[in-house]
Amino acid sequence: AQTVTQSQPEMSVQEAETVTLSCTYDTSESNYYLFWYKQPPSRQMILVIRQEAYKQQNATENRFSVNFQKAAKSFSLKISDSQLGDTAMYFCAFMKGGAGGTSYGKLTFGQGTILTVHP
Amino acid sequence: GAGVSQSPSNKVTEKGKDVELRCDPISGHTALYWYRQRLGQGLEFLIYFQGNSAPDKSGLPSDRFSAERTGESVSTLTIQRTQQEDSAVYLCASSLREDYYEQYFGPGTRLTVT
């Protein structure tokens, strides 16, 4: 079974600054996906970024980037130029991979980190 | 296009009553997932459907929980004889198919058992 651990229950950052959210995971799988999801107060889960385990290059989506350390089983999210709209709970999640780049869709989530961006 | 929708948005029920929660996936999505989110916690997987079959029900916490899906459309999660520990937000997600990585989530149903 997979486990995902987020050790920072809450974080805060000033607008325009950079913040890093931590995530570690444990798995015996060699093929998998990792995700960061954002959940604002509206409860709507939004996919922020994904990383395929077989890719060495860290994923980047605009102001969001990850630091994927496969050997250490670490997957942190860096948010640059933080904006007030980034205030939300952030979840790290794991999905087992299948053959040929497919996946097995059940997501395993961490406990979440509440991020507050201050003006 | 329309996203995943869930109804009701909020449900308050008395302990011991049965409740039904509904999920309408994105049209054309064959895979559908149910998760539970207790207050301040991460999401726990409950069950998923590929079409109208449920290959993985491993997350259902007890036999009071059941789910069904009609074709590749609506799904209903039923909780019988509700208990206070069932209070949570129940989230539904859909995906193009079970072997596709991206899941699209609905807004959830907040269930409160009094």
Image (tube, coloured by chain):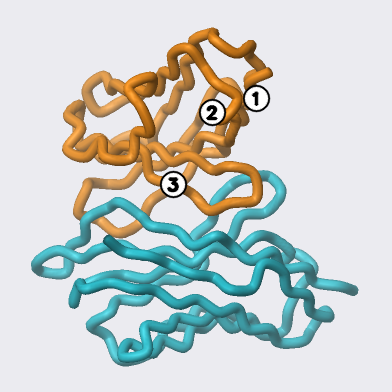
Chain colours: A cyan, B orange
Label 2 element class:
helix
Nearer-N-terminus badge (2/3): 3
- Indicate the amino acid at tag 2: Asp
Nearer-N-terminus badge (1/3): 3
Q: Kindly report the distance in space between the C-alpha atoms of the residues bearing marks 2 and 3.
A: 13 Å
- B20 to B73, vertically: above or below: above
- Indicate the amino acid at tag 1: Thr
Q: Quadrant of residue A77?
A: bottom right
Nearer-N-terminus badge (1/2): 2
- Indicate the amino acid at tag 3: Glu
Nearer to the camera, B25 or B48: B48
Residue under numbered circle 2: B86
Say which quadrant the C terminus of chain B sits in.
Answer: top right
Q: Quadrant of residue A16?
A: bottom right
Nearer to the camera, B47 or A117: B47
Q: Kindly report the distance in space between the C-alpha atoms of the residues bearing marks 1 and 3.
A: 17 Å
Nearer to the camera, A49 or B109: B109
Q: Which mark is residue B44?
A: 3
- A49 to B55, vertically: above or below: below
Tags 2 and 3 touching, CB below 8 Å? no
Tags 1 and 3 touching, CB below 8 Å? no
Name the chain under label 3: B
Please give the name of the residue rendered at 61% of the width and 55% of the height, measured from the top-left corner. A39
